[in-house]
Image (tube, rainbow, N blue to C red):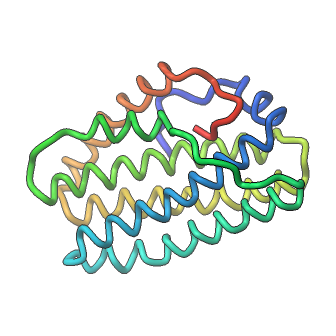
Amino acid sequence: MLGLKLPTDPRWVDIAQKNIEEILIDHAYCEQKAASSCISLIVQYPQYQKLVEVLTPVVSEEWDHFQRVLKHLSKRGFTLGMPRRDEYVISLHRSIPKGGSKVEQLVEKLLVNALIEARSCERFKLLSQQIEDPDLKNFYHELMISEAGHYNNFIKLAKEYYSPKKVEIRWEQWLEKEAEIISNLEIRSDRMH
């Protein structure tokens, strides 16, 4: 369903599990950034009513996820800590082509958001299947389902505002680019992506 061209390195879950504090901190900031990204799209493109209608509840869901990750941190005696640079997201944003119409720029941003949600969904699935902590196993299973829905929202919105055929072509190009980005990133013990 997600179409990712390069699966996560199988070693990532083991590394993440051994550094759960760092992963939870990074995850919290990923959720905060996801909410902020949806807010930015709404503010930049308020004339697109369907986008506003679809993304407004996503903002609430992402913020709820942020709060839930904070609870998991607190339950384990951890604090939020400082945000980290997300090289994965930064690389995706740098790959957005410059120029084009306003709607073309919107589609590029929607597809980048879909990629981030797809990769998060894939990683949450791995955690839900392999992490030893039963509380986190259930939590990540719930989030996997939610992220899959968000991924679908972004793809559908792109097709709402642009030629579905062109969106499919562009999505395939983005999947190739995302695989290239993932292949060039080191496996980090303190990063969700």
Residue occupying the point 9% across, 48% down:
100
Quadrant housing residue 31: bottom right
Q: Nearer the viewer, residue 63 or 10?
A: 63
Q: Nearer the viewer, residue 82 or 122?
A: 82
- Spot occupied by residue 97 in the image (x, y as percentages of width and height): 19, 39
Establish if 178 lies above or below 37: above
Kindly tell me whether residue 115 is visible in this rendering: yes
For image coordinates 55% across by 56% down, the residue present is 148
110 over 191 or under it: above or below: below
At 40% from the left and 52% from the top, the residue drawn is 113
Image position of 51 with respect to 184: above or below: below
**Residue 1 in sight:** no
Number of disc labels: 0
Image quarter in which the C terminus is found: top right
Residue 6 percent across, percent down from the top left: 51, 27
Pick the front one: 39 or 169: 39
Residue 180 position within the rendered picture, expressed as x and y whole percent measured from the top left: 41, 23
- Rendered location of residue 71, percent (x, y): 79, 65
Residue ID at (30%, 77%): 50
Q: Is residue 167 left or right of residue 100?
A: right
In the figure, is residue 163 to the left or right of 21? left
